[in-house]
Image: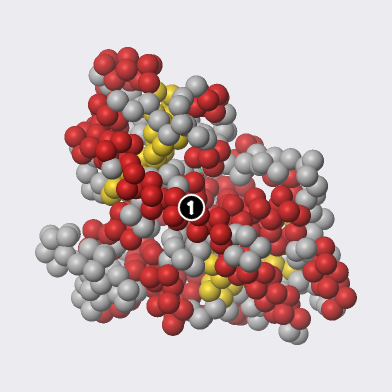
Amino acid sequence: MDQSHEQINSKHTIEPHVLMFPIPFQGPVNCFLKLAELLCLSGIHVTFLNTQHIHRPLLRHTEVLSRFSRYPNFRFETIPDGVEHETPVSVDRFLEVMAGVDVVTKPLFREMMVSGRFSWESERPVTVMIPDAYFSFAVDVAKEASVPVICFETVSPCCLWTSYLNLPTLIEAGDVPFKGNDLDELITSIPGTEQIIRRRDLASQCRSTDMSSQSIELIVKEAHAVPEAQGLILNTFEELDSLILKHMRKLCPNIYTIGPLHTLHKAQLTANTNPLQENNFSNSVWKEDRTCMSWLDEHDPKTVLYISIGSLATMTIDQLVEIWYGVINSGTPFLWVRRPGSIIGGYDESQVPDELLARTKEIGCIVEWAPQEDVLAHPAIGGFLTHSGWNSTMESITQGIPMVCWPNFVDQQVNSRFVEEVWKVGVDIKDTCDRLQVEKAVRDIMDSKRNVYTQSANTWANLAKESITKTGSSSIHLARLIDDILAMSLTQP
Ligand code: UDP
């Protein structure tokens, strides 16, 4: 990678300078930081723009500042977003955050970009912008400022294709909003998924009856903006999404598949840094509780169920108790992440039957936030009861861990369908969390159908490993992304 840095310096009068702009939530910020580090390793200058609301907890709970101080070509910038909360918000405030971005961040961002505020020491203007695809306004601003833009989509490609890029078509065809109540009706108008996606498997926003709502408006804007960008970065690998990538490329020809990003990042960091250097860092906006790792050490291989609903999803106390009963009745030891704020109305132990609490002391471990990548890599983990967030899904697939999917919102509805129907690595129990169903699904992945799920999970895990080798598809796509950033920077006026 040092070599490409030299190339940059010898060829360029204007040095490549990427402005990265994630949406202010745990998953996207984590992915953007990993990609930022990969770009820094290749010698590209990176300005990482966080909104203030997410930057505060990131600094509080991680070592990002000291870690990125290794890279003189990296710097953080922050921008106000009008959100006052000191802790990261849950999904109920998602639209509030996006509204704050719309009112406060968007005009400031435009002003900062057009006035050249992001130029580094004034002689280093931004040469390429990489915003989250959800920030469609950033594509408009980039065009206005004549800066090439490459969108980074941090939701899953299957969601992007079925429910975002195709949403205008679905609305035009009268498929969305749904007519009648049959959620099991197949959606046949999306190329590639005609026999797979039912109404209930589209992104949660598609269940809305109000096509002028803020959430629908955000997707429609994104559907128009993404194909206008010079490129699209996806956290997947070619084999995993071959079903839809060929269709997506007709609309967005320049796609970079650089996933699984977390393992590609780890592999490149190991290959390009001093072997004595500590590379196992967290980008968590909650404090990680690592005590669960020693609890896992006490268990036999593949015997523990890991349970987490990610950084935004929530559940009611009734849903918590149903899932809890299902897991306890399956007899499976479990490690459960209960993020502060994830129980709607707060967690009240008096509403939990004593028998659940007593049995949990025997076979369970509960933490507020776990080092998830390390947890999923631990030999004791045999299954993952997940909300099917895209990062969690990729992290599980990479480790060959079968899943029980209980999706909550956005892309999770689509991901869980793909987990069951396309990749065949788990059970989708969307729209229910009845204790009997949870128990059966957990027994299926941990025991009765374990061999079937593990076989396909291992196949995908091996393909994921293959994709990040030196000659693997994701490494090649990352190298092409870096080359293209250099080329785009050369053509700057
Ligand atoms: N995560 C973590 N510790 C936890 C729970 C989640 O580090 O206790 C991380 C997880 O590894 C993943 C991210 O948080 O990278 C969650 O992203 P995902 O896309 O799965 O779901 P979201 O939080 O965006 O709904």
**Nearer to me, 448 or 128:** 448
Which quadrant of the structure image shows residue 191?
Answer: bottom left
Q: Can you say whether 153 is above or below 284 in the image?
A: below
Is 137 displayed left or right of 345 in the figure?
Answer: right
Q: Looking at the picture, how far across and down is residue 482, in whole percent? A: 69, 70
In the image, taking residue 348 as reference, residue 209 lies left or right, namely left
Of residues 145 and 356, the one nearer the viewer is 356
Q: Residue 226: where, in percent of width, then height?
A: 49, 74
Q: Residue under circle 1?
A: 461
Residue drawn at point x = 54 percent, y = 28 percent:
293
Q: Amino acid at mark 1?
A: Ala
Q: Is residue 296 above or below residue 50?
A: above
Q: Position of residue 455 (x, y in %)?
A: 38, 49
Question: Could you tell me which residue is drawn at 33 percent across and 36 percent down?
Answer: 446
In the rendered view of the protein, which quadrant contains the N terminus? bottom right
Q: Can the viewer see residue 274 in this picture?
A: yes
